[in-house]
Image (cartoon, rainbow, N blue to C red):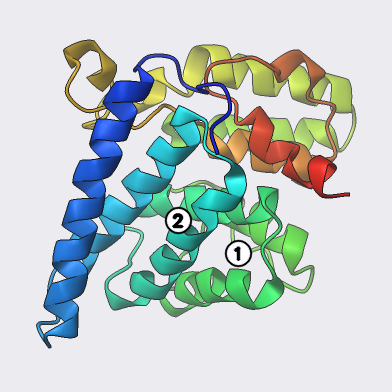
Amino acid sequence: MYMEIRDKLFTEEQYLSQLKLYNEEILYYEQLHRSGKHIGYDSLFNFRLRSLLVQFSVGKNLEDLKGNYMEIIRIMPRFWTEKGFYIEMLWMLSIGIMLEYDDNTMQKLVQLIKDNDVKDYIYDTLIRYRFPDWTQTTGTVLYPLPYQAVIAVTELAKQDKIEAVKRLEKYLKKEWYRGHSDLSWYNDHKYGINHDGYWCFESGALVKVLGLDDSILKGHPYYPYDMVHWADGQK
């Protein structure tokens, strides 16, 4: 089921064409694994995650994303470390919080972070929302550009939630996208070949974690409003 396209930098036709290609790649790697060739798990992960992003960008019902999400979690223990996959874990934690996955599912992500001894302020903040017994491991972020701003938002929320959401708005408008200018997907919409969508998933998770009013963020191109309010439609 489709709703309105959420990331309008590509057309529905372009997104669906990408989904078809990603599904073909997913099938290829899954067939490899079924035949006993245990290679390419990082590639399978990549195509499943990109497929999930496109599904969200094109306007699919959020229930349709869940299969990919669970498969991504199943694959991750095969290869995940924060080196090269920091953002992907941040997205997975954030999506899990917004779509309210059960504790057993979220615990699998937490275990990977624990096994790899990763210390990061944002990971800690998200994990403690679901597992209050989690000990804060650090007061810093692994990648200050652009994620230092998340510390500011979180600290502000302890004193003034209105100022916190204004700081989050600044992060979305001026810092988040520009802060990823070194990544392969930056500005990819301009070339008309591949574009999965630009989504600051951690901003949505922070709204839930910190109890912020996100009215001023609705309609912002990088803000996953539908995910933040998914549970509203379930009640």
Q: Determine which quarter of the picture holds residue 229.
A: top right
Q: Residues within 10 Å of mark 1 (few under 14, many from 20)?
A: some
Residue 137 is marked as: 1
In the image, taking residue 226 as reference, residue 180 lies left or right, namely left
Q: Determine which quarter of the picture holds residue 127.
A: bottom right
Of pointers 1 and 2, the one earlier in the residue sequence: 2
Q: Residues within 10 Å of mark 2 (few under 14, many from 20)?
A: many
Q: Determine which quarter of the picture holds residue 100.
A: bottom right
Residue 89 is marked as: 2
Residue 12 vertical position relative to residue 86 in the rendered view, above or below:
above
Residue 84 visible in the shown view: no
Q: Name which residue type carries label 1.
A: Thr
x, y percentage for residue 29? 16, 67
x, y percentage for residue 64? 53, 50
Residue occupying the point 33% across, 55% down: 48
In the image, farthest residue toward the bottom: 36
x, y percentage for residue 184? 21, 32
Q: Secondary structure at mark 2?
A: helix
How far apart are the alpha carbons under marks 1 and 2? Answer: 17 Å
